[in-house]
Image (cartoon, rainbow, N blue to C red):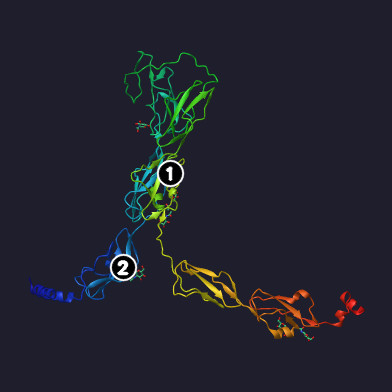
Amino acid sequence: MNVLGLIFSIGAVTFSCAIPTILKDKCKHPTKVEHAELDWSKGDWNKQAYSQGVLAYYICRPGYMRLGTIRKICSEGEWVRISNGSCKRKRCNNPGEIDFGTFELINEEDFLFGAIVEYSCQPGYQMISKHKRIECTVFGWSKEPPECEARLCPPVVDDSVRILSTVLDEEYTHGQVINLQCKNPNDKLNGPSQIYCTTNGTWNIEPPTCKDYSEEGGMAVKQSHGDKLIPITVELPQVEQKEQKLTETKCAPPPLILFAELIGERKWMYDSGSVIQYQCLMYYKVKGNQQIKCQDGVWDLPPTCLRPCVLNYYYMKGNNTTVENGRSKFLEHDEVVHFKCLPTFEISKPGQLNAKCLDGTLQYPKCVKIKQKRTEKKCSPPPFILFGELMGEKKWMYDSGSVIQYQCLMYYKLKGNQQIKCQDGVWDLPPTCLRPCVFNYNYMKGNNTTVENVRSKFVEHDDAVHFKCLPTFEISKPGQLNAKCLDGTLQYPKCVKITDEVTAQPSVGTETTVY
Ligand SMILES: *[C@@H]1O[C@H](CO)[C@@H](O)[C@H](O)[C@H]1NC(C)=O
Ligand SMILES: *[C@@H]1O[C@H](CO)[C@@H](O)[C@H](O)[C@H]1NC(C)=O
Ligand SMILES: *[C@@H]1O[C@H](CO)[C@@H](O)[C@H](O)[C@H]1NC(C)=O
Ligand SMILES: *[C@@H]1O[C@H](CO)[C@@H](O)[C@H](O)[C@H]1NC(C)=O
Ligand SMILES: *[C@@H]1O[C@H](CO)[C@@H](O)[C@H](O)[C@H]1NC(C)=O
Ligand SMILES: *[C@@H]1O[C@H](CO)[C@@H](O)[C@H](O)[C@H]1NC(C)=O
């Protein structure tokens, strides 16, 4: 150790002795924040101590995103949060439905970072893509969703046979029928001349090949399997000797129907009266008659196969429902599935939790959050109204449902409801009190009128008043002598001096002059 090194180490010792006292006001390494790391671009976090007032900045771990800032301050030896940002897991979009398939979230409730979605195909379909799972990563979904396609039967590749098919395609979907013939007229097929493609992408039987039966009856010597000749024993097909008469009473091969297979072998021609039977694929439900009959060259109406429903767990979650554990994902047509609301959710009508699969479609019920039974709000004292008062005692607070009653002052007339109710903190509209009219004798005099049978100086709203003209005065139209008090206003009629001109008028006037 050189001198400099010695001084340095002594210095270090001195320093380390001093640390405990310094640390009393200083902070140690910044404390952890969930899903976050210290931001090294904003400081050196390898120090042993941090002074009062130092800020620590945090960033989110991969797969998490920051909502708000995350900072702490060193205060009296403790790291104290000064902002309440947090790191939330990143989300991916809904990866989407695929044709002929469905998906399910495997490990998570939602499309969060790390969530795995697994796709599956409907019966009769298979996945083309190698992967059935996709994962939500920092950059979105790890892969495109897979695709489902109908299972196909392999092409028949035997050089000795000729394929007669209505389908030009090299590949065959389920239910398709092909007819086989030997290219060499001397050869015979070692199996039926008609085969069909089944739902799981295989032919109903191994496609037959052609053999030459000319030598050693019963012993086939040629079979075209690659370039090897394998002698095998086969049964000679029963060749119909009788010439088949093509009469109108025979039926052509029965119609192919979607999602169904024919039970038994398919033939070229069916005698009148023949009965054949269809079978729907697994989970598909037959509608109509499974058996149909050939009658005078015409087949009965074939049945149809109604599609099953595939439970969509994502829809269920979105609608806040679930089904019982371990339930099959598939439902046959007409089958009822009983949904349950997720905990703390409820359905408006209980019966709506049952849904029926109808030819591949299923209506998912919706559940909503159970509402907290809220206590209804109380009302503050009822509103003050002009010219009216509250009957009974006035309180500081009224319970919801309380009813109070107003009363108008004397001569004032109530309009609206006399009683009002407190409903969840709000009072009904209060009534109003309409003003009475006060007779103005000056006006009457000025307008040359007087009033009949008056008992008081006041007339209530809506009450009628009958005026009279003062003697030797008259009104132009008699009806105008009636007036009505309307919320404090009264129209006084006017009477005018009876003039000679008026008395001189015909009818009434003439008679007067005769006297
Ligand atoms: C914490 O969050 C609330 C809102 O959730 C906000 O009003 C408040 O200002 C935040 N406090 C700090 C220190 O950021
Ligand atoms: C095809 O399906 C039938 C039933 O429909 C089954 O017996 C057979 O084993 C299946 N074949 C394959 C290769 O899966
Ligand atoms: C609820 O179910 C329906 C089908 O009945 C579906 O179309 C809808 O997307 C679901 N809602 C959510 C939020 O997933
Ligand atoms: C499911 O519940 C959530 C949370 O209460 C709500 O936002 C959503 O609208 C509900 N879904 C349906 C389809 O009502
Ligand atoms: C007549 O009556 C009206 C009210 O209808 C009043 O305004 C008017 O002053 C009266 N006329 C006189 C001369 O008093
Ligand atoms: C009432 O009668 C007097 C006397 O005839 C007349 O001057 C006055 O105009 C009359 N008042 C009204 C409002 O017509």
Kindly report the distance in space between the C-alpha atoms of the residues bearing marks 2 and 1. 44 Å
User: Is any part of residue 255 visible from this angle?
Assistant: yes
Mark 2, residue position: 70
Which of the two discs, 2 and 1, labels the residue nearer the N terminus? 2
In the image, residue 272 sits, relative to residue 432, either above or below, namely above
User: Is any part of residue 364 visible from this angle?
Assistant: no
Q: Quadrant of ligand 4?
A: bottom left
234 vs 388, nearest the viewer: 388
Q: Does the numbered disc 1 mark a residue whose Cβ is under 8 Å from ligand 3?
A: no
Tell me which corner region of the image, top left, top right, bottom left or bottom right, holds residue 196: top left
Local secondary structure at mark 2: loop
In the image, residue 116 sits, relative to residue 31, either above or below, namely above
Rendered-image quadrant of the C terminus: bottom right
x, y percent for residue 451: 72, 80
Amino acid at circle 1: Asp
404 vs 379, nearest the viewer: 404
Q: Residues within 10 Å of mark 1 (few under 14, many from 20)?
A: few
Tell me which corner region of the image, top left, top right, bottom left or bottom right, holds residue 221: top left
321 vs 419, nearest the viewer: 419
Quick one: which residue is furthest to the right in this view?
514
x, y percent for residue 239: 43, 16
In the image, residue 72 sits, relative to residue 178, either above or below, namely below
x, y percent for residue 22: 17, 76
Mark 1, residue position: 99
x, y percent for residue 460: 64, 76
Left or right: where 138 falls relative to 368: left
Rendered-image quadrant of the N terminus: bottom left
Tell me which corner region of the image, top left, top right, bottom left or bottom right, holds residue 16: bottom left
Local secondary structure at mark 1: loop
